[in-house]
Amino acid sequence: MSVSQAKVIADASVQPRIGVGAVILNERNEVLLVWRNRQPEQYSWSIPGGKVDPYESLETAIIREIKEEVDLDIAIEGLLCTAETIRPEQEEHWISVLYFTRVIRGIARNLEEGGAIGEIGWFPLNDLPSPLASFTVPGLQAIKQLYSQD
């Protein structure tokens, strides 16, 4: 078997995974971002979210993930966009569904301290930290476009 054939076989075992993310704005139109301590996209700022579990709906997943990560109860306002991250060198393929949400209850706090999330913060849409996770960028672009139409 050649090296290229072995690579194709190895790649066949990698399946796309589904993730969800939430663009959450506060009353000052600042967006909640989290610092990623783990892959995928380790050492970057991202919107909070995570993977969809088997037999879990997308909307249930994003509500659960936000509660688990930042202790907020949210309501989904609408679907913003989708994002795709393909990194063959890391054997990663993620399809992310990104939602515009609002806080119903709670104050954002890091429930993953020492784990997947290093820190959290609220940032003005026109002054975002760097680097941003690749799947975060389309969500932030979509929310900026939504607000520029108002």
Image: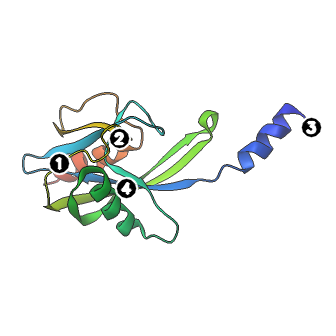
In three-dimensional space, the C-alpha distance between marks 4 and 3, rounded to whole angstroms, equals: 41 Å
Q: Are marks 2 and 3 in contact (CB under 8 Å)?
A: no
Q: Nearer the viewer, mark 1 or mark 4?
A: 4
Q: Position of residue 61 (x, y in %)?
A: 39, 63
Mark 1, other Cα within 10 Å: few <14 / some 14–19 / many ≥20: few
Name the residue tied to disc 2: 137
In three-dimensional space, the C-alpha distance between marks 3 and 1, rounded to whole angstroms, equals: 55 Å
Q: Are marks 2 and 1 in contact (CB under 8 Å)?
A: no
Q: How many numbered circles does the render carry?
A: 4
Amino acid type assigned to the residue bearing label 1 in the image: Ser
The quarter of the picture where the C terminus appears is bottom left
Q: Mark 2 or mark 3, which has the lower sequence index?
A: 3
At 83% from the left edge and 39% from the top edge, which residue is drawn?
6
Q: Nearer the viewer, mark 2 or mark 3?
A: 3
Helix, strand or loop at label 4? It is strand
Amino acid type assigned to the residue bearing label 3 in the image: Met
Q: Position of residue 109 (x, y in %)?
A: 20, 46
Q: Position of residue 21 (x, y in %)?
A: 35, 53
Mark 2, other Cα within 10 Å: few <14 / some 14–19 / many ≥20: few
Name the residue tied to disc 4: 81
Q: Nearer the viewer, mark 4 or mark 3?
A: 3
Q: Mark 4 or mark 3, which has the lower sequence index?
A: 3
Name the residue tied to disc 3: 1
